[in-house]
Amino acid sequence: MLHHTRCNWKIGVESFLDHYHPKFVHHSMFRATGASLEDMRANSVADLGGGHTELGFSHHNVAVGRPLAWAGGIAPERLGDYVPAMEAAYGAEEANRRLIAGAPHVMVFPNLCLAQMNLIVFHPLGAGECVQETAPVLLDGAPALNRRTLRQCEGAMGPAGLIIADDAEIGERTQTGLMARSPAWLELSRGLERDHTDSDGALRSPDESDETTHRGFWQHYAQVMARR
């Protein structure tokens, strides 16, 4: 799916870096679906280095401990042979861990987002417009899960998607606001005092609303542009 938006591609990227906007920008989605913000909670944000960043949805899923919460909480028996096949391939304990954790939400610098079961690429068209390309992640030998994934992708990121329409509107309004160039700088220091290096070497904050991910992206972007 392709979506043309009148904003710079980096504004689109930023919407996937932070987790303080959903409760405001996507309020209509929660109201329409009956979902809770708790269903989308991330218990950490991380700068993985090299401009790559992560929202810790998988960490939250593990803390909750509910299998397939990332797939809308669908009952395992509704996915045909998928769960038995996972158990046969990885063993019951590891399969259960993977079914709980789900897929990651990672931004691969500069413009690829692995958004759990969606792949998203931002294609710049100019300083003030871009195209967002979205595709669902479909797995070999898992037709029931693939049908679920496709419907979720359509509902969130399709032409009438509940998420992409909100993000596009805010992206275009942000682009308009930035054209004023006043103030000349934007503040991205939220949570700076909470950043710490974890055992994997990532710079991580336990507060999902912190701007650790923004700082990681922009610091690397500045380094790349300085070499040109």
Image (cartoon, grey):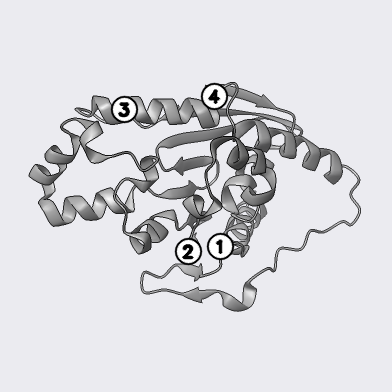
In the displayed structure, would residue 125 be above or below residue 188?
Answer: above
Q: Which mark is residue 146?
A: 3
* Residue receiving disc 4: 158
Q: Position of residue 17 (x, y in %)?
A: 58, 51
> What is the spatial separation of the Cα atoms under label 4 and label 1, in whole angstroms?
26 Å
Q: Are marks 3 and 4 in contact (CB under 8 Å)?
A: no
Element carrying mark 1: loop
* Residue receiving disc 2: 43
Q: Are marks 4 and 2 in contact (CB under 8 Å)?
A: no
Which mark sits nearer the N-terminus, 3 or 4?
A: 3
> What is the spatial separation of the Cα atoms under label 1 and label 2, in whole angstroms?
6 Å
User: Which of 155/184 is in front?
Assistant: 155
Residue positioned 76% across, 35% down in the render:
172
Which mark sits nearer the N-terminus, 3 or 1?
A: 3
Q: Residues within 10 Å of mark 3 (few under 14, many from 20)?
A: some
Query: In the image, what residue type sits under mark 3?
Result: Asn
Which mark sits nearer the N-terminus, 2 or 3?
A: 2
Residue positioned 31% across, 27% down in the render:
146
Residue positioned 79% across, 58% down in the render:
186
Q: Residues within 10 Å of mark 2 (few under 14, many from 20)?
A: some
Q: Are marks 2 and 3 in contact (CB under 8 Å)?
A: no
Which mark sits nearer the N-terminus, 1 or 2?
A: 2
Q: Residues within 10 Å of mark 4 (few under 14, many from 20)?
A: many
Q: Position of residue 13 (x, y in %)?
A: 61, 44
> What is the spatial separation of the Cα atoms under label 3 and label 1, in whole angstroms?
29 Å
Query: In the image, what residue type sits under mark 1?
Result: Glu
Q: Which mark is residue 208?
A: 1
Drawn side of residue 88 relative to residue 4, left or right: left
Query: In the image, what residue type sits under mark 4?
Result: Gly
Q: Are marks 1 and 2 in contact (CB under 8 Å)?
A: yes
User: Which of 33/150 is in front?
Assistant: 33
